Image (cartoon, grey):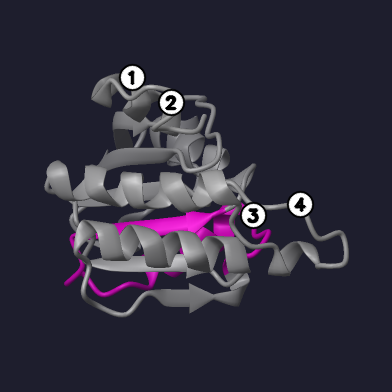
């Protein structure tokens, strides 16, 4: 079995209108939410064997903060192709991975993150910023991924859990002063 962790980048800033979409940084909320998701991964023993991220600044920064907080020690792989890519690009990238990575995390943008969850599990889920989907795949090899699997009667993956900053806030019992929505 393979495990796929799908993370939408954390909240980004629109403060500087001169910046291109690609260069937008994380805002204060994003800088808080990304490490919380990383700590959550560590707590649940879900440290990825490989992290693949969009090369957009907000995704790179999310990846960096999550990796540090969860204890990921390998290099995060940045992919230009993940920036505003359709789900097929993610499938092709995952299909080409060596099978030495049992647990992989991808970090990218909506609507693609929601589409990936749907294609793999057959479930329609909302993925707000910094949302993390934990999917167990019924495959032994990455090359077995089928782009249309979720559209069939027997999806290739099971959505084990979906965490958002709000659900983590509720789980941890954090007050609004300690946790930004």
Instruction: Name which of mark 1 and mark 4 comes first in the sequence.
Output: 4
The structure residue drawn at horizontal position 81% and vertical position 67%, both measured from the top left corner, is 20
Helix, strand or loop at disc 3? loop
Visible in this render: residue 154?
Answer: no
Report if residue 27 lies within the magenta region.
Answer: no
Q: Which residues are magenta?
A: 82-108
CB-based contact (under 8 Å), mark 2 and mark 4: no
Where residue 101 sits: x, y (%)?
A: 21, 67
Check disc 3 and report the residue beneath it: 86
Location of mark 1 (residue): 170
For label 3, the crowd category at 10 Å Cα-Cα, with few meaning under 14, some 14 to 19 and many 20 or more, is: some
Q: Nearer the viewer, residue 142 or 101?
A: 101
Q: CA distance from mark 2 to mark 4?
A: 21 Å
Measuring from the top left, give residue 28's x and y in whole percent. 56, 49
The local secondary structure at tag 2 comes to helix
Choose the circle earlier in sequence order: 3 or 4.
Answer: 4
First-in-chain label (3 vs 1)? 3
| Front residue of 150 and 36 | 36
What secondary structure is marked by label 1?
A: helix
Query: Circle 2 sits on which residue?
Result: 166
Residue bearing mark 4: 14
**Which mark is first along the chain, 3 or 2?**
3
Q: Quadrant of residue 37?
A: top left
Q: Is residue 68 left or right of residue 11?
A: left
- At a point 41% along the width and 50% down the height, the residue shown is 34
Q: Nearer the viewer, mark 3 or mark 4?
A: 4
Labelled pair 2, 3 in contact (Cβ < 8 Å): no
């Amino acid at each position: 079995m393979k495990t796929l962790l799908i993370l939408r980048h954390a909240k980004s800033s629109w403060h500087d209108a001169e910046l291109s979409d690609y260069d937008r940084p994380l805002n204060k909320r994003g800088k808080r939410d990304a490490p919380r998701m990383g700590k959550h991964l560590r707590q649940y023993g879900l440290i990825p064997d490989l992290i693949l991220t969009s090369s957009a600044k907000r995704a790179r920064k999310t990846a960096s903060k999550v990796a540090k907080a969860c204890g990921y020690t390998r290099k995060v792989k940045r992919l230009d192709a993940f920036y505003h890519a359709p789900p097929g690009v993610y499938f092709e990238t995952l299909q080409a991975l060596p099978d030495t990575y049992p647990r992989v995390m991808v970090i990218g943008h909506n609507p693609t993150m929601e589409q990936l969850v749907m294609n793999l599990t057959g479930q329609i889920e909302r993925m707000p910023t910094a949302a993390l989907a934990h999917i167990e795949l019924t495959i032994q090899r990455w090359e077995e991924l089928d782009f249309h699997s979720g559209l069939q009667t027997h999806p290739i993956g099971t959505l084990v859990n979906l965490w958002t900053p709000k659900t983590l806030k509720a789980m941890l019992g954090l007050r609004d002063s300690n946790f930004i929505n």
